[in-house]
Image (cartoon, grey):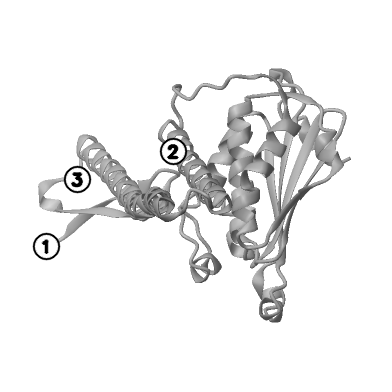
Amino acid sequence: MPSQCFIAPITQVGDVLLGVVRAVKPVTLGLFSPEQRNLLADFARELGIVLHNHELVSSDTRVLQKRLAALQYGLAEGIHEFRSPLHNILSLSTEIRHIHPSDSTGIKEIHERLKDEVYKLGRRINNYLVVSLEGRDDMKYNFQKIELSDIIIRCVERFRHFASRRNIQITYDKSVKALPTIDGDGGKLEQVFENLTENAVKYSFDNQTVGISAKTKERTVTVSISDFGLGIPLNVQGKIFEGYTRSVEDKCRFKPGTGLGLRISLQIVKKHYGEIYVHSEPLFVDPRRVGLNEGFHTMFTVMLPRRLDETMKGFYHEDASD
């Protein structure tokens, strides 16, 4: 029996052709009326929207699953990060009971180790507080005139004992002492330099030096923290500020952690209209150096404006090219 056919395209957003709706009608029933053609065209258009939305939902579901997996991993690592210093504090408090009161050296050593663990626990709490308030108005910044040199030197002194356990020296040159007063939230910036200094010590090889230097320009200051360890692979360097990102080399070194410190540090520096840069020699440049305990240079650089002003967003990029 002779028939007639009407075809309506199924399109996605952007007129991407997904397929067609094909309707067949015997000619004995007459031609497709304009109303019927419009109805079929509307049906095809709505079908395209449904398929497009289904694709978006599927994509969002995959992203959500990845984020959930990262959250589960981060939760497990986070629990360990809190449990580790608490366990060490408990062990040290037990150990101090067995030290003779006349052993002032032993008491001082345990006292310093207890301080290290308490500070470590405090840093973990502060980091998770920043993450929990990310994107909300609850995280307040107290911008005022601050002495950045005092903050950095305080961080160095805080980590000296922790670093000395592996014979790591922490040094800063005269450029750090010469840093000018800048605008910023002292507590938040101290959190940044604590995170960076802790990472530098943690990832350094034994018997190495963590060095801190600074530069002062007309409108910006930069502070660089260098260490010598396994380095950061090139394929990871672009992701280390995302959080929950750990390189294979990290796992090989049995260094626990969530990687949140860098994400939080970047968030704080961005609030100051600043930037953090990383330069690192990856392990595969010359693996033989690992056997010689010669570290690969890694340097994190924090750039901050000396004065905070809404009108100068982005100006430091020009200053950085000087």
Dividing the picture into quarters, in which one does residue 136 lie? Answer: top left
Q: Give the CA distance from mark 2 to mark 1.
A: 79 Å
Near mark 2 (Cα within 10 A), the count class, few <14, some 14-19 or many ≥20, is some
- Callouts 3 and 2 close, C-beta under 8 Å: no
Tell whether 115 sits left or right of 226: left
Residue 241 visible in the shown view: no
- Callouts 3 and 1 close, C-beta under 8 Å: no
Looking at the rendering, in which quadrant would you find the C terminus?
Answer: top right
Tell whether 26 sits left or right of 278: left
Indicate whether 175 appears above or below 104: above
Which residue in the structure is indicated by mark 3?
31
Q: Give residue 68's position: percent from left, percent from top.
A: 33, 51
Name the residue nearer the viewer: 287 or 46.
287
Q: Give residue 220's position: percent from left, percent from top.
A: 80, 31
What's under tag 2, amino acid-wise? Ile
What's under tag 1, amino acid-wise? Met
Which residue in the structure is indicated by mark 2?
125
Q: Give residue 65's position: percent from left, percent from top.
A: 32, 53
Q: Which of the marked residues, 3 or 2, is nearer the chain's N terminus? A: 3
Which residue in the structure is indicated by mark 1?
1
